[in-house]
Amino acid sequence: MVGSLITALGCICAGAIFVAHVGVPHETTPELKIRAVAHQWWWEFDYPALGIKTSDVLYLPSTMNIHVDLASADVIHSFWLIGMKKSMEIIPGKPDSLDLFITSPGELYGNCDSACGCASVCMRFRVLVSSPGDFERWAAHARL
């Protein structure tokens, strides 16, 4: 009971700082584009304009329009972040996209909740959201 209550409160708090728009036309040009690729059984996050790739940790700036292209390298996966109403199915050969705007720094979690072969336990990832300035410092260090 206590565990369920903590999970519910965590989702509510995460939802307060996280806004996702799926399939909504861009009202503004994204300030950052990321390509998220699901692999059996890990996530690759590619920041093409920055020349950075990470695995299982998605670094994001707060208060910026972010566009995420979703793709699968192998089987059907799904992309879900705490605060999203439902996960997005990612089918090999059929990319999808997601627009994000996160209002404040913090840490979120995501995962694949599809039956991709490992009961999704090993498809979890962290989302570390920092201020735009801290994100720029992270990017400069990550490029080295």
Image (cartoon, rainbow, N blue to C red):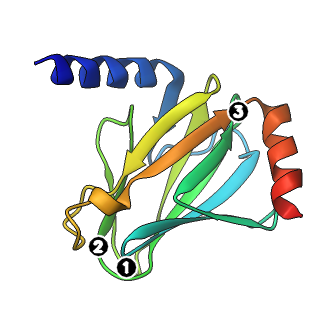
Q: Quadrant of residue 82?
A: top left
Q: Secondary structure at mark 2?
A: loop
Point 85% across, 33% down: residue: 133
Q: CA distance from mark 1 to mark 2?
A: 6 Å
Identify residue type, mark 3. Answer: Ser
Which residue in the protein does label 3 denote?
130
Q: Which mark is residue 76?
A: 2
- Point out residue 87 in the picture as x, y percentages from the top left corner: 31, 49
The disc label shown at residue 51, or none? none
Residue 12 shows in this picture: yes
Q: CA distance from mark 3 to mark 1?
A: 31 Å
Q: Badge 1: few (under 14), some or many (20 or more) residues near its Cα, within 10 Å? A: some
Look at mark 1 in the image and give the residue it sits on: 92
- How many neighbours does mark 2 have within 10 angstroms: few (below 14), some (14-19), or many (20 or more)? many
Which corner quadrant of the image does residue 117 belong to? Answer: bottom left
Can the viewer see residue 80? Answer: no
Badge 3 crowding class, 10 Å Cα cut-off, few under 14, some 14 to 19, many 20 or more, is many
Marks 3, 2: nearer the viewer? 3
Cβ atoms under marks 3 and 1 closer than 8 Å: no
Which residue is drawn at the image coordinates 56% and 53% (left, top)?
Answer: 57
Camera-side residue of 132 and 120:
120
Is 18 on the left or on the right of 75, as rendered?
A: right
Is the residue 111 above or below the residue 136 in the image?
A: below
